[in-house]
């Protein structure tokens, strides 16, 4: 969210709420296509509609504003949503780096905040590579890779039937049917049953559980040569700690126990997810 947009929201709200209340309004909110998702502190609950209407005034294309009522949770990584203003609709079309993603934000995971990270990965893919995306959602990483690299194939797995249906539609809309293969199922099982030793690169964008699936990720890589695992995790770090280093230690220890030769390990903070909590991305290069 741009700084001047945040400022506009606060300026607009200061005409309608007390200075104390304006201070409590969360600075960031998500715009996904023509839908906005806000979080409102309990103390401002009764003013939710005022906040929602101000957002619709600033972002003229926004047709409905939903309030997030629960954290993202469960296997499908969904959040509770309650309509605050505008149309009662959760399906929308979102655009990112020349790709179009249709999504129902109530039935599928979706975050516009990962846009930079998705494109960063797409830019790393070399011509002719085979990629396995273990937790593909509605297909954002897979489709961006297909559009912005000369990848040979992206096997794109998700366990949520609704996300799988949208993924299929997004593959068709973006005309990448020849490159992206949508697969419905549990990534671990799918790899064991049909995707062993096929990939040059594997993506694990499920930070809550990627660690559990590391062995499966390694099984999908083909030999010989250097291969890449894009691993995601959430990590807590105090002021004097580095969350990336903490994840590096955890992952390299696990790889050691699995007998994997680690070539390089680089990482970055994708975003802050709460006080002292970070989403971390590791690019892991392994051989043999
Ligand atoms: C955090 S979302 C990431 C979605 C997508 N990569 C994106 O950037 O929008 C994680 C996804 O993993 C899926 N998922 C959870 N457990 C899974 C499993 N065992 N196998 C395959 N997909 C799974 C969820 O349904 C969800 O869509």
Image: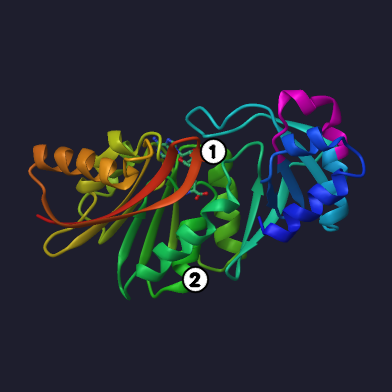
Query: Where, by quadrant of the figure, is residue 42 drawn?
Result: top right
Q: Is residue 174 left or right of residue 130?
A: right
Q: Position of residue 164 (x, y in %)?
A: 53, 45
Q: Is residue 203 left or right of residue 257?
A: right
Q: Is residue 158 above or below residue 80?
A: below
The circle drawn on residue 81 is none
Q: Position of residue 155 (x, y in %)?
A: 38, 55
Per the image, the residue denoted by label 2 is 147
Per the image, the residue denoted by label 1 is 161
Q: Main secondary structure of the magenta part?
A: helix
Does any portion of residue 160 appear in the rendered image?
A: yes
Residue at 83%, 40% in the rendered image: 51
How far apart marks 2 and 1 lie (CA) works out to 24 Å
Q: Position of residue 108 (x, y in %)?
A: 59, 40
Does any portion of residue 152 appear in the rendered image?
A: no
Where are the magenta residues, as a range?
38-50
Q: Secondary structure at mark 1?
A: helix
């Amino acid at each position: 969210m741009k700084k001047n947009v945040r400022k506009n929201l606060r300026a607009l709200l200061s005409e309608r709420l007390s200075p104390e209340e304006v201070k409590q309004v969360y600075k960031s909110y998500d715009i996904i296509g023509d839908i906005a998702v806000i979080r409102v502190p309990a103390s401002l609950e009764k003013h939710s509609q005022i906040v929602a209407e101000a957002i619709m005034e600033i972002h003229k294309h926004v047709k409905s504003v939903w309030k997030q009522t629960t954290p993202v949770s469960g296997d499908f990584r969904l959040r509770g949503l309650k309509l605050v203003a505008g149309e009662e609709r959760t399906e929308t079309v979102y655009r990112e780096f020349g790709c179009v993603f249709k999504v129902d934000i109530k039935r599928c995971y979706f975050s516009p905040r990962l846009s930079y990270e998705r494109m960063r990965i797409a830019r790393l893919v070399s011509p002719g590579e085979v990629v396995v995306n273990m937790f593909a959602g509605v297909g954002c990483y897979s489709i961006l890779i297909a559009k912005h690299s000369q990848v040979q194939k992206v096997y794109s797995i998700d366990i949520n039937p609704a996300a799988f249906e949208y993924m299929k539609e997004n593959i068709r809309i973006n005309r990448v049917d020849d490159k992206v293969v949508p697969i419905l199922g549990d990534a671990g099982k799918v790899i064991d049953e049909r995707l062993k030793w096929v990939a040059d690169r594997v993506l694990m964008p499920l930070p809550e559980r990627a660690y559990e699936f590391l062995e499966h990720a390694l099984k999908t890589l083909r030999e010989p040569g250097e291969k890449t695992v894009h691993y995601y995790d959430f990590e807590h770090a105090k002021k004097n700690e580095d969350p990336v280093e903490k994840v590096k230690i955890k992952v390299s220890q696990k790889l050691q126990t699995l007998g994997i030769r680690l070539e390089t390990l680089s990482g970055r903070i994708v975003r802050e997810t709460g006080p002292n909590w970070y989403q971390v991305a590791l690019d892991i290069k392994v051989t043999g």
